[in-house]
Amino acid sequence: MDFEILKQQIEDAAKKAFLEVYEKHGAEGIYSFALYSDEGAMTVCPAANTMKVLETADEEDALYYKYEPAEWTYEMEGADEEFNEICTQLRAELDQYEDDDQWFEGFQAKLYSTCIEVLEKLKNENFFTKITGKDIFLIFTVSDYEFEMEELKDLVVRLNDNEYRSEYLNWMATWGN
């Protein structure tokens, strides 16, 4: 699989997904965007959330609902055809190497880093800010998988140089207490 081509496909799909969600739900105050995959590296999907949705979140778990893409309202919304095509390509590639664990580990790591690179590129181009006029929280996550704490901290710092970064890192400091 040519990861440079895949990276461009993911970037194009992410832009389209965000624009579609913004067009439909921009008035609700979109504050976040994520790309996520699964442990089997078979999918790449977008997710977004809005301040309006957060108004109804349980106060005790407000930060969890604010920062956990699995809880976001606009999950797998936008650029449906493009993301479906990406997932089809990933599954086809995985089918070719289904019994090669070493190959899979490299493929999974490369897919995850590609998604993070796309988000970082869009952040550095101010893609989200140009559309919304404000900072957007960015994250990459994997369903049913937990990143190491340091890895997650590095990811949040890498993708966010805004007020969301410090709020997220302060929230992380409370985990396990």
Image (spheres, rainbow, N blue to C red):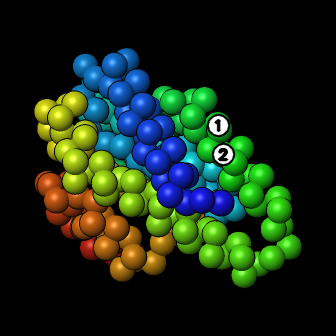
| Residue on which disc 2 sits | 87
> Residue at point 48% right, 38% down?
13
Label 1 residue SS: helix
Decide if residue 116 is in sight here.
Answer: yes
Instruction: Give x and y (percent) for residue 39.
Output: 64, 63
- Callout 1 touching callout 2 (CB < 8 Å): yes
Which amino acid lies under the numbered mark 2 shown in the image of this protein?
Answer: Cys
Q: Is residue 50 left or right of residue 77?
A: left
Asked if 99 appears above or below 128 in the picture, the reply is below
Which amino acid lies under the numbered mark 1 shown in the image of this protein?
Answer: Asn
| Residue on which disc 1 sits | 84
Q: Is residue 63 left or right of residue 113?
A: left
Q: Residue furthest right?
A: 99
Label 2 residue SS: helix
Q: Nearer the viewer, residue 171 or 8?
A: 8
> Residue at point 64% right, 69% down?
107
Instruction: Give x and y (percent) for residue 72.
Output: 44, 40
> Residue at point 40% right, 24% down?
20
